[in-house]
Image (spheres, helix red, strand yellow):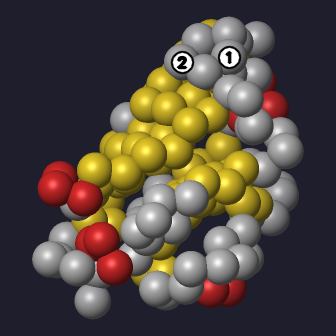
Amino acid sequence: QVQLVESGGGLVQAGGSLRLSCAASGRTFSSYSMGWFRQAPGKEREFVAAISRSPSSTYYADSVKGRFTISRDNAKNTVYLQMNSLKPEDTAVYYCAATTSLYGLARERLYDYWGQGTQVTVSS
């Protein structure tokens, strides 16, 4: 069992930055690939970024490539999402998720554990 707790969301102006954190319980964090997803009002949840378990390969949605960076610190059982050059269309609830899969990390159905989400609002 893995419990995930996101933090770092908030209100920011367009062009600003935020860093989301996701703290995981348990001693097997390094065994999981981690993903970030988001859900805007009235829309389906969508993939944002993922980082595989060792070796840590990273993957991004086209909409955030070059602006967002995912990273992990296995010693702290934490995954991060650094979000720069934020746009109003980035407004959503952001969720982190964990999976034992190594491939296909953009697929939501592969993830076994989910956090409760953190709200990110980008004003224009």
Where is residue 96? Give x, y as percent.
48, 61
On screen, residue 83 above or below 55 = above
Q: Are marks 2 and 1 in contact (CB under 8 Å)?
A: yes
- Cα gap from disc 2 to disc 1, whole angstroms: 6 Å
Check disc 2 and give the amino acid type: Ser
Secondary element type, mark 2: loop
Residue at image position (19%, 71%) is 25
Residue at image position (51%, 67%) is 52
In the displayed structure, does residue 97 sit left or right of residue 107?
A: left
Where is residue 118? Give x, y as percent.
46, 47
Furthest-front residue in this view: 55
Secondary element type, mark 1: loop
Q: Which residue is mark 1?
A: 85
Q: Which numbered marker is on residue 17?
A: 2
Label 2 crowd bin: few (<14), some (14–19), many (20+), radius 10 Å = some
- Frontmost residue, 73 versus 37: 73
Q: Quadrant of residue 104?
A: bottom right
